[in-house]
Image (spheres, rainbow, N blue to C red):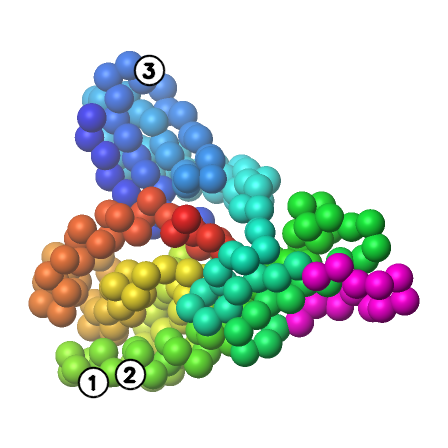
Amino acid sequence: MATKTIELAGVGPVTLIKRAQSRSLRLTVTAGGVQVSMPRWTPFSAGQAFALTNIDWILAELEKQPQPLLESGQKIGKMHYLRFEQVLNDQAATSRVTATEVIIKLHHGEHSTEAAVQKRAHATAVRALKREAERLLPPRLQTLATKHGKQYSSVGVKQLKRRWGSCDSHQVITLNLYLMELPWEYIDYVLLHELSHTVEMNHGPAFWRTLLAMEPRAKDLSKQLKRHQPVIGTWN
């Protein structure tokens, strides 16, 4: 079974899979990612074109994917833990981020698994991840850039839906705040990946030579990272 992973703008990684039993092109979108199943004799370029033609449908299906259920005591990023807290009838059920906690207060009668509560919890957890990412990622990127003799013009942190990071032609690097949910070796891989794009904008042989010179395990780390999506609890 031959496979190939491509990057689709706005979507992220899409896995093309050639199957002996496939008789036509077929798209599948799950929490695990986007796949195109295709007949064994079909060129990968046809699978990529098929995904591009159906990009609006893919994006709509991705929006339908459920968010992981957040639970009290769950670790958020590198520095925070989630806590649900019931309030008295006359207290405001506000949510906040401290130095070590993401605190979600519940109205009287509310339960932590309710959709409205989970929505508040996700939004507040994202705030915590953004704080962590803005504090930890820029200095780590600069350390790696200095170590490997790479330069970039600026770095920013955003909430990206499908990509872990990006680098444009002006050497502006954007990092996904959900990186804080990954082990540090995978965070470093993404940072080195984007630093490689300051030299080579595509994913051709020259790009991989640049990246592998900095991280010899890059191809293995890339394959493993493709199994995970930018969401809270991605590594779990």
Residue behind mark 2: 142
* Element at label 1: helix
Amino acid at dot 2 = Gln
Q: Residue at x 20, y 72 (%)?
A: 199
Q: Quadrant of the N terminus?
A: top left
Dot 2 surroundings within 10 Å: few (below 14), some, or many (20 or more)? some
The answer to whether 25 is drawn above or below residue 179 in the figure is above
Separation (CA) of disc 2 from disc 3:
49 Å
User: Residue 23's mark?
Assistant: 3
Per the rendered image, the range of residues in magenta is: 85-96
Q: Residue at x 28, y 43 (%)?
A: 5
- Say if mark 2 contacts mark 3, CB within 8 Å: no
Residue 36 screen position, x and y as percent: 36, 32
User: Residue 146's mark?
Assistant: 1
Q: Earlier in the sequence, mark 2 or mark 3?
A: 3
The overriding secondary structure of the stretch rendered in magenta is loop
Residue 90 screen position, x and y as percent: 90, 67
User: Residue 134's mark?
Assistant: none
